[in-house]
Amino acid sequence: MSASWLDKNFKWVMTLPALLFVLLMMVFPIIYTVRISFFEWSMSASTPPRWVGLENYYQLMVDVRFWKSVWHTFQFMVYALLLQMILGVGIALLLHRDFIGKSFAKTVFLLPMVATPVAMGLVWILIYEPTGGVLNHLVQLVGIRPMDWLGSVKQVIPSLVIIDVWEWTPMITLITMAGLTTIPKDPYESADVDGATGWQKLWYITLPMLQPTILVAVMLRLIDVLKTFDIIYSTTQGGPGSSSETLNIYGYVMAFQYFKLGSASSLLVIFFIIVMSLTLLFMFVRKRLGGIS
């Protein structure tokens, strides 16, 4: 290999490792999953995959459990995302003000985000424990009867949302605080001259100028919330029954408990399309709102 050839193709040589990584670790698994979704396969070496065409997709469309998992996925996403955005932005505005112990408060507040999700799931099982859990002890102090947080069909999704909000609200706060530092002081000084109140400065200056940052935070969390697996599996495994079974959990159960690799792959392909569609839709809305310069 001559030095002149290397100089001429230097940019391609340097790009090649990253390109190979993307092809092997991202593109290949997607293509393989799509291919398997057209086969019936139990992951047995003695029984080769059998071509069934779109049968796996048809079976999913008539599967009640699949549609319930779609509902649980969106239910979990809407509740978690809404609460995280409201709390995350609100806390960021509070932490942006000057007060004694501000650095310590920020450090403590960001701790849940760096914790291992599975370990935190196990901790929350103890917190939610119906007879000796801390949470039931606290609600009894304010006159509320103890609840079966993770064992109740009606309460399991809100209980899981609380865990996700506790763990990932700091991420929204962190992003929002970074956005707050980029807002210039000039508009606030002009507002002070005009006699604007704190609420008016928040509504007419801070939030509009934070809009691009907030939209980025929403998009990042939207993708992540849809894919939540660790917290749900470590606490309920989709139960009780299938009342907290999201698309991720159902795909895992179908693949590694029922050994229906073809059906699980078709579910994951549909899930991938849902995530991509929502992301593209959100990017389109963000562009329309002027979030992209």
Image (tube, grey):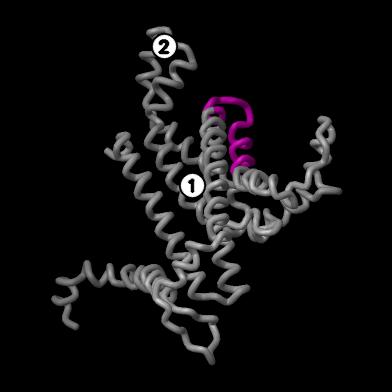
Q: Where is residue 226 in the image (x, y as percent from the top left)?
A: 50, 52
Judged left or right of residue 132, residue 274 is left
* Residue 95 in magenta stretch: yes
In the depicted view, which residue is nearer to us: 54 or 220? 54
Name which residue type carries label 2: Asp
Judged left or right of residue 216, residue 14 is left
The alpha-carbon separation of the residues under discs 2 and 1 comes to 35 Å
Residue shown at 81%/47% (left/top)?
Answer: 133
First reached walking from the N terminus: tag 2 or tag 1: 2
Report crowding for label 2: few under 14, some 14 to 19, many 20 or more residues within 10 A (C-alpha): few
Q: For the stretch drawn in magenta, what is the main secondary structure?
A: helix
**SS at circle 2:** helix
Q: In the image, which disc is placed on residue 221?
A: 1
* Residue 114 in magenta stretch: no
* Placement of the N terminus among the 4 image quadrants: bottom left
Q: In the image, which disc is placed on residue 192?
A: 2
Q: Is residue 203 visible?
A: yes
| Whether residue 119 is situated above or below residue 84 in the rendered picture | below
Q: Position of residue 177 (x, y in %)?
A: 48, 35
In the depicted view, which residue is nearer to us: 145 or 40? 40
Magenta residue span: 94-110
Residue shown at 49%/65% (left/top)?
Answer: 60
Residue shown at 17%/77% (left/top)?
Answer: 3
| Whether residue 197 is situated above or below residue 41 in the rendered picture | above
Judged left or right of residue 150, residue 275 is left
